[in-house]
Image (cartoon, grey):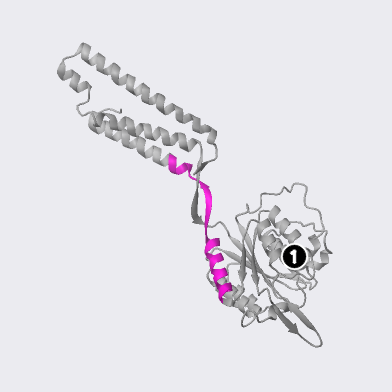
Amino acid sequence: MTFIWPELLWLLLVLPALVLVYWLMLRRRKKVAIQYAGLATVRAAMGGSQFRRHVPPLLFLLAIALMLLAAARPAAVLTLPSEHKTMILAIDVSGSMRATDVAPSRFAAALTAVRTFVEQQPRNTRVGIVSFAGAASLVQPPTTNKDDLLEALGRMQLQRGTAVGSGILVSLKAIFPDVRFNLNTSDPRDVDQRGSAGARALGSDMGKEPPDDFKPVPPGSYGSAAIILLTDGQTTTGPDPVEASRMAAERGVRVFTIGIGTAAGEVLTGDGWAMHVRLDEAPLKEIAELTKAQYFYAGTANDLAKVYKTLSSRLTLERRESEVSALFAAGAALLAILSAALSMLWFNRIL
């Protein structure tokens, strides 16, 4: 347990002083009773039962202690429902996803795992889908309608090129529709060349300066949305994915990355061409680290299913540090009420 205002813990020094005051009052009461009354009066003054007479003050002292601790704003790591209300699934649809080092293929395994993930989401969680190859586009804006999400997944087709950075930027645009990005590492037109409405909006904003009132926030601090990026990690075009992830980090958005494929990879062939495709984990690990998220490796279809299951539970229930001052204050109130009730029951007075 930690305290947000630990400097207020010095107030606990009041407790020994209160104990001393209570002890002095008992001594004074005893002297007065002995000096001015008979034995029966002394016994009455002593309260009859030595144990009972100290219980209400002890409970009240504990109540004061809890109130002083509450003033220092205690915090603890708890497992609580996640605050994520929007999740963007960014899926690689480049030609390298045809590789069969993940059976039956990287792309088929990815779609199967994503469908299961979508079906397991709570009703109040909005899910959006972004696809990226040589360009990126918003296939399905964030919605709670699972039928629309599953239909959008069914429309995906493999294309040429891999622009991982574009996938991150379009995902950010889906979370912050009014945000402006400034990325000088690539032509803004690399974000999307296909002319969809959402992508055109993103392309028009790319290259503009951020608004003057924009202030970066700590990485991972934005709890209302997250991005889950699935790719084999080999960027061939578009913005630098690491620079794009820095923009996500400045807005507190975590980008969980999933690397699908194997380090050995596979050689894909076509009409007169051959290409060796393999998993490139380094940039995916860096993206996750920059945004205070996590990288997952999926070398088989079973691994991929487990990754999405882990992410589903992690993004639904999260362990995070939360302030628990209210619990301390409630405990203090209950002890104070109990102290007063016992005092009235046993002695017909409060303390």
Q: Quadrant of the C terminus?
A: top left
The magenta stretch spans which residues? 302-328
Kindly tell me whether residue 178 is visible in this rendering. Answer: no
Residue at image location 33% in from the left, 22% down from the top: 23
Q: How many marks?
A: 1
The spot of residue 288 in percent (x, y) is 66, 60
The spot of residue 300 in percent (x, y) is 59, 76
Say which residue label 1 marks: 165
Residue 57: which quarter of the image?
top left
Residue closer to the observer: 199 or 311 = 311
Relative to 142, is 63 on the left or the right?
A: left
Relative to 63, is 102 on the left or the right?
A: right
- In the displayed image of the protein, which residue is found farthest to the front? 264
Is residue 345 inside the magenta stretch? no
Considering the whole magenta stretch, tell me its main secondary structure.
Answer: helix
Q: Give the vertical position of 161 relative to 174 (above or below).
A: below
Residue 40: which quarter of the image?
top left
Residue 187: which quarter of the image?
bottom right
- In the displayed image of the protein, which residue is found farthest to the right? 187
The spot of residue 260 in percent (x, y) is 65, 73
Residue closer to the observer: 279 or 40 = 279
Residue closer to the observer: 130 or 12 = 12
Residue at image location 40% in from the left, 37% down from the top: 332
Residue at image location 32% in from the left, 34% down from the top: 339
